[in-house]
Image: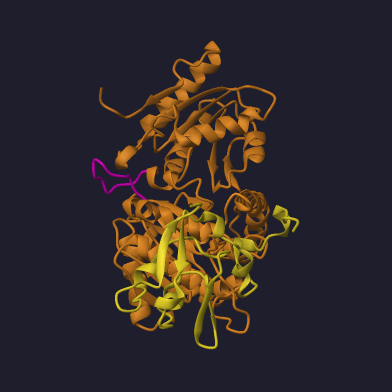
Chain colours: A yellow, B orange
Amino acid sequence: MKKKGWKELTPGAVVTEPGSSRQFKTGSWRAFKPRWIEENCIHCLFCWIYCPDMAISVKDGKRGEFNFDYCKGCGICALECPGKKGNKAIVMEEEGN
Amino acid sequence: MPKIVAVTGNEAVAEALKQVNPDVCAAYPITPQTDIMQRFSSFASNGKVKTEMILVESEHSAMSACVGASAAGGRVITATSSQGLALMWEILWIASGDRLPIVMPLVNRALSAPINIHGDHSDGMGARDCGWIQLWSENAQEAYDNTIQAFRIAEHMDIRLPVMVCLDGFIISHSITRMEFLEDEKVRSFVGDFRQVNPLLDLDNPVSYGPLILTDYYMEYRKAHEHVMSKVPGVVMQVADEFEKITGRKYGLFESYRLDDAEIGIVVLNSAAGTTKDVIDEFRSKGIKAGLLKPRLFRPFPYAEVGEALKHLKAVCVLDRADAFGASFGPLFMDIASSLYIQDKRLLMFNRIYGLGGRDYMPDQAELVLNELVDTVKTGKVRSVKEYIGVRE
């Protein structure tokens, strides 16, 4: 997409298109990557609620795979994940390993 | 008929704010500004204005609340001084970057330390580059008139930027002078209604304020801001012309006093200009061609116009009521020097720092400076580019 010049911008950087942050992909910021372990998942959707971006996909009330276009690797999902019988359904791993 | 009154500068500003009747005001008390907001909150309590007063715990919060209220769609005011402005500093840039037309009287007071409550310009100068418009006022009448005009300038569709209206702490804020108040209806029809371009409270058209803008667009937004600043002088003149029609009082980007045929000149902001003009009259009666330039629109600084107005002088002294530590010269001097740099001719120029922390600026200081200008022209040499005057060795 061709970037806009300074004359074409909305005054004060006001965003007038709702939901346009979908176009702003931040996956490249990540240093740690969450890994989903499906057998430990109870589909409580805590990860979906706590995710500050939109990196958790949900379908029919069930948790799906990560959308890594939006995951910055903050680790909140892994921290909040209750897991099953003491085994976490999300673990953080160093990116690139 | 305008009402002739004897009031303080603060009372004059509070009256202007009352007549405008803004939607929201968030402010925190600080000397010497307190008196404005004390009066204004009485107006709100007594039903004289319909303004929503927001109590806050600091000036940082005051400006933050103003940002929110202005983005929401309200006509918003606050007021501050010195440390209060310093505490707002972070949010000043957000108000201007979001292009929110907040109006804020700034009762100029020295910055700590050492702690001091009196008038000097270090507060306003510290915020001169934060993207706000600054209007400076010599006396209560100018502070009142600038406050009313500030709304029109801030809210102009080509501008949409916040405006600070500066007046000297105590010297103007707490001294009683004769001045004229306009009728309420005249002020109201002059400022008109305010309509935010992209109000947050327009639920049918949802918008977001304050997005993250990184290397890809930040510079374009800064260029856009600089461009808007360049349109401000034209709007200030347009508003001044309309204001003259209802008041008979003429305002420009700056005031020139006996400057057209002058050979020597003083440039000075705010209240000290009054004293200086008296002394210039004395020198004129002795046959010395002295004049004065008093900036009104200080940000954006009208470089071309100021340079044009000063370039015929042989020597000029810039009086600064603030120092810019480490920058070699006072802030006003640096702007005047830049204004003259873009002119072909180089003038003899010097900078004198006066009146810090409310130290009285007396006629003998103006005399001292004017005599030095006369000597400078005679010898063709500047004795010393920067010095403090009225200071004990």
In this rendered view, identify the residue nearer to me: B251 or B322. B322
Q: Is residue B1 visible?
A: no
Q: Residue at x 52, y 13 (%)?
A: B381
In this rendered view, identify the residue nearer to me: B279 or A36. A36
Which residues are drawn in magenta?
B108-120
Q: Residue furthest front?
A: A39
Q: Which quarter of the figure is the N terminus of chain B placed in?
A: bottom right
Please tell me in which quadrant of the rendered image residue A41 appears.
bottom left
Q: Residue at x 38, y 30 (%)?
A: B365
Q: Residue furthest top?
A: B379
In-image side of B308 versus B296 (left or right): right
Please tell me in which quadrant of the rendered image residue A28 appears.
bottom right
In this rendered view, identify the residue nearer to me: A52 or A38. A38
Q: Residue furthest bottom?
A: A60
Residue B23 percent across, percent down from the top left:
48, 77
Q: Residue at x 33, y 38 (%)?
A: B356
Q: Is residue B109 magenta?
A: yes
Q: Residue furthest left?
A: B114
Is most of the magenta stretch helix, strand or loop? loop
B256 above or below B240?
Answer: above
Q: Is residue B306 visible?
A: yes
Residue A4 percent across, percent down from the top left:
72, 56
B31 above or below B323?
Answer: below
Q: Residue at x 33, y 81 (%)?
A: B45
Residue B19 percent across, percent down from the top left:
48, 73
In this rendered view, identify the residue nearer to me: B245 or B346. B346
Q: Is residue B4 magenta?
A: no
In-image side of A66 versus B80 (left or right): right
Residue B72 percent across, percent down from the top left:
52, 75
Q: Which quarter of the figure is the C terminus of chain B placed in?
A: top left
Q: How many marks?
A: 0
